[in-house]
Image (cartoon, helix red, strand yellow):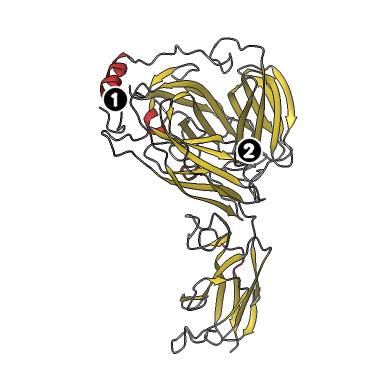
Amino acid sequence: MYKRFKGVAAATGLVLLLAACQTPTAPQPGGGGGSGGAQPSAEFGTIVGYVVNANAGEAVAGSTVSVYKAGTGHLLGTTTTGSDGSFTFDASTGAVDLRFEKDGYAGSQVLNLWLEGEGVTRVHVIQRKAFNPAWPTAPPEVELGKVEDGNVYDAMAGFIAYDVRVAPAAPLATDLIYAALGKTPGSSFITGLRDVYFSIDETGDRFMDPLLYAAAGPTTFEVVVYDANGNRTHLYRHVEISVPFINGVDLVAPELRSVLAVTLNKQIGFFSVSPLGAPEGGNLYVSLAWLPKQDFSHAPNDAPYGYHVYRSFDGENFEHVGTVSGLNTSFLDASPELAPGRTAHYRVTAFVGDLESEPSNALATTPLDAFDVLLTAPADGAGDVSVTPTFGWAPTQTVSGYHYYAGAVWDTLTGESAWFASRSAPILVNRTDWTWNEDGAYSNTPLETLQRGRSYEWHLIEAYALDDPVHPTAVSIAADGLGLWFPFGVASTDHFTFTTAP
């Protein structure tokens, strides 16, 4: 029996597995996207979308949204994104294509989005600024082979075959091709597992394992493509994953251990990789971690096929926002619906097929606003500075009761560097100045004072705020040169030089 799934009724699973096959026999969702499915009923649904300039990025306001019947040039209507990047559109159920246009921005399109009846279909769209506005801003043409709307795949029967072919507008080249099951793929930091291809127009024959995505039931196969000017195409296929081994499973709710909202004051593109949420020029996401639980009172122990992540903004009505495999115990929520000051509640369940555990405990976070820190003294280019200078800085705003700082000074002649901070607390708390060697940490060393007539460079290597100093659930980062909170680091805004008195 397949070892990635403990707790499966082996006999039942094997019987069903031998009977299973991959065949496009499921009802087809709408006639769009070239799939030739059954015509939808005359029901209506609502698209609620957000357009942002990066994963976890800031809003793209004033982008024109054109909605078409999928796979045709039949225009259903247009609308425009608001100041928060949001838009809504009502249309009859079925598949639609969305195209986004704005001066100075690359083109973006979403193809074959399935519009649910009497409900809300949510879509998060990335529209980047054009690398060169004089270059073509038409989204690349994308063909997905071997995967059609309505295909049914057995999770245990192997891999999903696919191939992607891209034709960007001349003279542009393809930059990135992403593919994933059950989610919109992007950078691995934000979206986790996905297939990625660089600088090629055709992937050739490829295979995707649904087990690795914990895909089950109706789901999506999604492809995202960027060209060299940042133009983007996002293609959906609506498929179903059969998970036959669901008998005799006794799942235990996981324990949600932590949620941490991370606000960055400088935007990371995450393209080698949604704003109502993100501050201008920054990023905002929430990181979750949980502890798996199993019932060891019987054998075999029931390990989950995967985990569902749920989020609520009122603490009562939870919405499914993501799924990861049973091998994962963490998740990043980069939704553009997140916002500074808007509390988000989370909980997690374990599942196998249609069987789902009770929800975990719920944890909440209220993201902090972004802030920056500007250096004040010694001023950039200052001369005749004391060999025991007082360093000063000023945050652009106070976002919590706990601001933390640490600075560094470089001798530009020798390349030697030193931190400035208190001996008892290497990170200064709620301080906006520090005098060299004020606590005697460098006394009786060559760093007791700076050298006379020497040029130095200084900046804040750490500048961040926490909502709670002991058990933080939110951090706002102005600088993180050590990667304490953000693994890729965040550079400080100011780097000043000065010269000490001769």
Q: Secondary structure at mark 1?
A: loop
User: Visible in this render: residue 269?
Assistant: yes
**What's drawn in magenta, residue-wise?**
491-495
Q: Position of residue 255 (x, y in %)?
A: 43, 45
Q: Position of residue 362 (x, y in %)?
A: 52, 44
Residue closer to the observer: 269 or 391: 391
Kindly identify the residue that appears in the image at 43 percent across and 87 percent down.
445
Quadrant of the drawing holding the N terminus: top left
Q: Position of residue 111 (x, y in %)?
A: 59, 24
Does the magenta run of residues contain 494? yes
Q: Are marks 1 and 2 in contact (CB under 8 Å)?
A: no
Residue named by callout 1: 9
The residue positioned farthest toward the front in the image shown:
297
Along the horizontal axis of the image, is 361 left or right of 74?
left
Q: Nearer the viewer, mark 1 or mark 2?
A: 1
Disc on res. 127 = 2
Q: Earlier in the sequence, mark 1 or mark 2?
A: 1
